[in-house]
Image (spheres, rainbow, N blue to C red):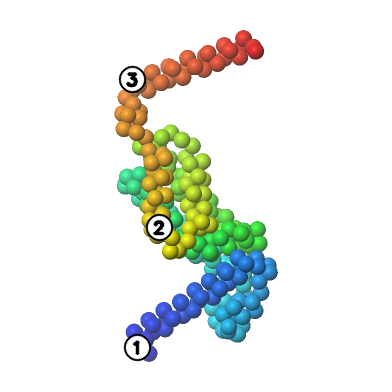
Amino acid sequence: MGRTSAKAETGRKALLRQSVLDAAAKLFAERGFAGTSFQDIADALNVGRTALYYYFKSKEEILASLVEEVTVVSDRQSAMLSARTDDDPVEVLRSMVSGHVELLLSHALHFRVVDRTEVELPPDLRAVHERSKRAVLDHFTTQIARGIQQGVFRPVDARVAAFALIGMCSWTTWWFHDGGRKTAREVAGILADLAVHGLLRTDDQRKAASDPGNLFRQLHESLDCLELLYKRQDAGP
């Protein structure tokens, strides 16, 4: 078999394997993981069980591949972007959000299935899934914290902000539809803009944050407010 023929055969196998994943994901979404048998998946593809065994040995193995496609790849992607510590944290976060949205929307059904079947995952697979989810959260948190430290993001709770951004990205898999007014890439860009603009300091805030005199005045005002609060508490109702 020539190189071109081998490449074509590899591509064909990849497409067939993806067809199995898509069919299984659809059935898992409709019937639940527990309510779907390996035979159901074979029937949906109009093939015998033996043909499925060429790609997957069980429906659990299919579910593991779905987790790999969505959660594990999300971890790798966000880790790679977050590692760009010499780049502008605003642009890195923008890339992280847009990349996360595009990845999820390219596997929207698969993500929804994994999200719904978290409690049904075998212990080993659930551990991989949870570890990858925590890693994605940590990558987003680290990037937001870096922007705060550099004075370009507002001093918010970085972990809460990371939860909010990831939740915003994940929700697109439930409402986005191909063929709508916006493409997946356009939606990803819009959400990335919302993410960074929701965290950015204004020009005035950046200047104020870098002025030692202003920082001292803010600290003094905060102490005055705190003293007034204690006096009110001591005075009683």
Percent x, y for residue 49? 61, 83
**Viewer-side residue, 34 vs 50:** 34
The residue carrying pointer 1 sits among few (fewer than 14), some (14 to 19) or many (20 or more) residues within 10 Å by Cα, namely: few
Q: Which mark is residue 2?
A: 1
CA gap, disc 1 and disc 2: 42 Å
- Left or right: 171 as drawn, with respect to 234: left
- Counting residues from the N terminus, which is met first, the one under dot 1 or under dot 2? 1
Of pointers 2 and 3, the one earlier in the residue sequence = 2
Residue 232 visible: yes
Circle 2: residue type = Lys
- Give the residue number, with chain letter if any, for mark 2: 182
Secondary element type, mark 1? loop
Viewer-side residue, 11 vs 43: 43
Residue at image point 58% right, 63% down: 113
Dot 2, how many residues are within 10 Å of its Cα: few (below 14), some (14-19), or many (20+)?
A: few
Callout 3: SS:
helix
Badge 3, how many Cα within 10 Å: few under 14, some, many 20+? Answer: few
Residue 135 seen: no
Marks 1 and 3 in Cβ contact (< 8 Å): no
Q: Nearer the viewer, mark 1 or mark 2?
A: 2
Determine the CA span between mark 2 and mark 3: 47 Å
Left or right for 11, reference 233:
left
Please give the residue where the numbered disc 3 appears in the rendered image.
213
- The Cα–Cα distance between marks 1 and 3, rounded to whole angstroms, is 73 Å
Amino acid beneath label 3: Gly
Q: Position of residue 18 (x, y in %)?
A: 49, 74
Q: Sequence order check: which comes first, mark 1 or mark 3?
A: 1
Q: Quadrant of residue 219?
A: top left
Q: Amino acid at mark 1?
A: Gly
